[in-house]
Amino acid sequence: MIVLSKALQRIKPSATVGISQMARKMAGEGRDVIALSAGEPDFDTPDAIKEAGIRAIEGGRTKYTNVDGIVELKRAVAEKFRRDNDLDVQAEDCFVAAGGKQIIFNALLATLNPGDEVIVPTPYWVSYPDIVLLAGAKPVFADCDAKSGFKLTPEILAGSISKNTKWLIINSPSNPTGAAYSRDELKALGEVLLEYPWVHVLSDDIYEQLLYEGKEFFTIAQACPELAPRVLTMNGVSKSHAMTGWRIGYCVGPRPILAAMGKLQAQSTTNPSSISQWAALEALNGNNDFLAEWREVFLRRRNFVVRELNAIEGLDCLMPDGAFYVFPSCSDHFGKTSKGGRPIDNDEDFVMALLAENGVALVHGAAFGMGGHFRLSYAASDNDLKKALSRIREFCQGLR
């Protein structure tokens, strides 16, 4: 008999990964499936970055590196935080890992103990609470519904803090809602946190470059500099440079926490891929003019998707500020039955029936901690989005 870890029993599989795998399996069986479930840009990695990776291979840069990243990349990370976010940091304040998820995983596992609490605004990225639970700590959910634009308010934050609070996690722009905080909104949250000096902040800025219609990005250590000594600011190249498979994330934060993260990483993956690090160096230092074109494409898709969803009876979709997701409400359809005879009692029933009967893969809102909604990724071709929205409309019209 195989007995598995009790720690693993505290967590559940990733819903986004699970549904995406289900969609791939159906497609492999010959089904016509449009997958809008994954959080991945549909653009290719820019050629200059790919060429930097090829040069690294040809130049023999295929050996172990420092656990926390090559010096050249850490210097570029520090320069990025100085240039883009007005953070006064050096390479020694920075850390590189195999993706943004590993940064978050390392930071939480290196600092959390049983009894500690982590404030997780709801809706949340699916992995936050499970990483907290894996570390033996407790996620404390702060509900941020559509009335607040899916954003944490100072009042909700203050009501969520206890003597056991270790971290607050902020994700802006957000996965799954696309909501983004202004400088004033972040400063107001920072002023609350200044009253609680034992609380650290993990700022997940992975969608920083994907803001639309001239909206300006701010991170909390920038908006509230007094808070900076206890903020870990995470970012990466996955979303900004279409490098999801390259697996490079980075952060800046307190050096004692970075040292603890390095100790943990040395016993897990050791260094991130050496080849990917040299490619990421080009991503941070090279020409990023392509981003303006990408943003225009995503903006067009966003506007189309929101308009089409709001034209479907029973769906209600806020206009997101950034990222490439929408998070519409579908609760008006609960209590109905699909054409195929499937009862629709909640958002998971809705998305599973839609996938089975109309071949569109979405992720149910309960996976992000807020039932009654679903997440749709518009990081897909215009043609796929048009077909998917037509199928969603047909599905909703068939509900009785």
Image: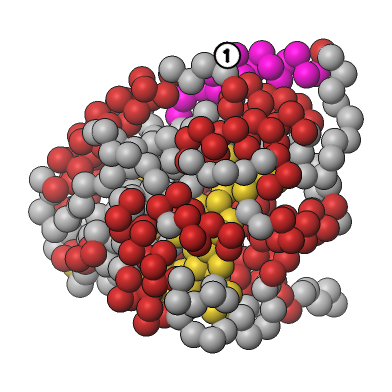
SS of the residue under disc 1: helix
Count of labels shown?
A: 1
400 or 365: which is nearer to us? Answer: 365
Three-letter residue code for mark 1: Asp
Name which quarter of the figure residue 14 lies in: bottom right
The reply to whether residue 202 is visible in this rendering is no
Viewer-proximal residue among 209 and 310: 209
Task: Tell me residue 155's x, y (percent).
Answer: 30, 76
Span of residues in magenta? 42-57
Which quadrant of the figure contains the C terminus? bottom left
Residue at the spot 37% in from the left edge and 82% down from the top edge: 159
Residue 48 inside the magenta-drawn segment: yes
Instruction: Judge by depth and name the residue closer to the eye, 342 or 368.
Output: 368
Q: Main secondary structure of the magenta part?
A: helix
Q: Residue at x 54, y 37 (%)?
A: 82
Q: Is residue 84 above or below residue 14?
A: above
| Residue that label 1 marks | 47
